[in-house]
């Protein structure tokens, strides 16, 4: 299975990331206040999230798939791209999201699966290869994740990514929201530092 290419470790990365942290925190917090936008797009991209034992979707994955199905049923885009490989055991994130989309009324021919990635960068990089003509894409994920996802989407060649924030169960629990927002601030600092 092909996965996201690994980058060679750069010993200056932690220092660069530390200098980027204040800006990363501002961007992630601004991202938590983004709202979804109307209008049409070329594709809807469902970012991967945890699959529980037995192939059950996590609350995050379920919320993302439900939001994507609503967007597709409203005619916002002709395609839905599900993303994510399996981590410890099959099925993978993309497969489980596809199953949910079908249950929610999305036509099979409208779903494209990206099954190689293991992180947000891979989700978007490999999705780019599956929908090479797409310019405007709707990125479906939780608010804490939006700023980083939009930045990466632009880096991999989606010129007009549109946010669609999803209020998952984790977002509704204050401690989880704080933990996940802090984690994304650190991840955003690494992305900004080139890591």
Image (cartoon, rainbow, N blue to C red):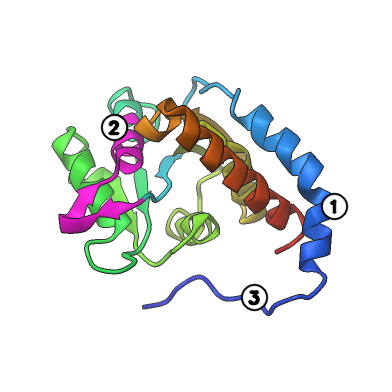
Vertical order, 156 against 160 (above or below): below
Residue 158 in view = no
Q: What percent of the width, then of the height, locates residue 180? A: 52, 41
Q: Secondary structure at mark 1?
A: helix
Q: Residues within 10 Å of mark 1 (few under 14, many from 20)?
A: some
Q: Which residues are magenta?
A: 50-67
Along the polypeptide, which appears first: circle 2 or circle 3? 3
Q: Residues within 10 Å of mark 2 (few under 14, many from 20)?
A: many
Numbered mark located on residue 66 in the image: 2
- In the rendered structure, the answer to whether residue 140 lies left or right of residue 74 reads right
Residue 111 in view = yes
Vertical order, 85 against 94 (above or below): below
Residue marked by disc 1: 19
Looking at this view, is 5 or 162 the one in front?
5
Vertical order, 121 against 43 (above or below): below
Residue found 35% across the figure and 31% down from its top: 169
Distance between mark 2 and mark 3 Cα atoms: 34 Å
Q: What percent of the width, then of the height, locates residue 161? A: 57, 38
Distance between mark 1 and mark 2 Cα atoms: 38 Å
Residue found 66% across the figure and 36% down from its top: 28
Task: From the image, state whether disc 3 or disc 1 is nearer to you.
Answer: 1
Numbered mark located on residue 169 in the image: none
Image quarter where the C terminus lies is bottom right
Residue marked by disc 3: 7
Along the polypeptide, which appears first: circle 3 or circle 1? 3
Looking at this view, is 37 or 141 the one in front?
141
Looking at this view, is 164 or 27 the one in front?
27
Q: What percent of the width, then of the height, locates residue 64? A: 36, 37
């Amino acid at each position: 299975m092909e996965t996201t290419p690994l980058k060679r470790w750069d010993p200056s990365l932690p220092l660069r990331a530390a200098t980027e942290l204040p800006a990363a925190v501002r961007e992630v917090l601004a991202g938590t206040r983004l709202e979804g936008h109307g209008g049409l797009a070329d594709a809807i991209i469902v970012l991967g999230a945890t699959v529980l034992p037995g192939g059950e979707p996590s609350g995050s994955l379920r919320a993302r798939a439900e939001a994507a199905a609503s967007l597709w049923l409203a005619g916002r885009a002709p395609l839905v791209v599900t993303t994510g490989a399996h981590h410890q055991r099959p099925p993978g994130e993309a497969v489980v999201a596809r199953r949910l989309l079908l249950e929610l009324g999305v036509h099979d021919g409208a779903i494209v699966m990206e099954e190689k990635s293991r992180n947000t960068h891979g989700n978007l990089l490999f999705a780019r290869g599956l929908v090479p003509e797409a310019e405007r894409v709707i990125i479906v994920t939780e608010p804490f994740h939006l700023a980083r996802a939009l930045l990466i989407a632009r880096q991999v060649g989606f010129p007009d990514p549109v946010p669609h924030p999803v209020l998952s169960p984790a977002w509704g629990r204050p401690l989880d929201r704080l933990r996940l927002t802090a984690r994304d601030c650190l991840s955003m600092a690494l992305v900004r530092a080139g890591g």
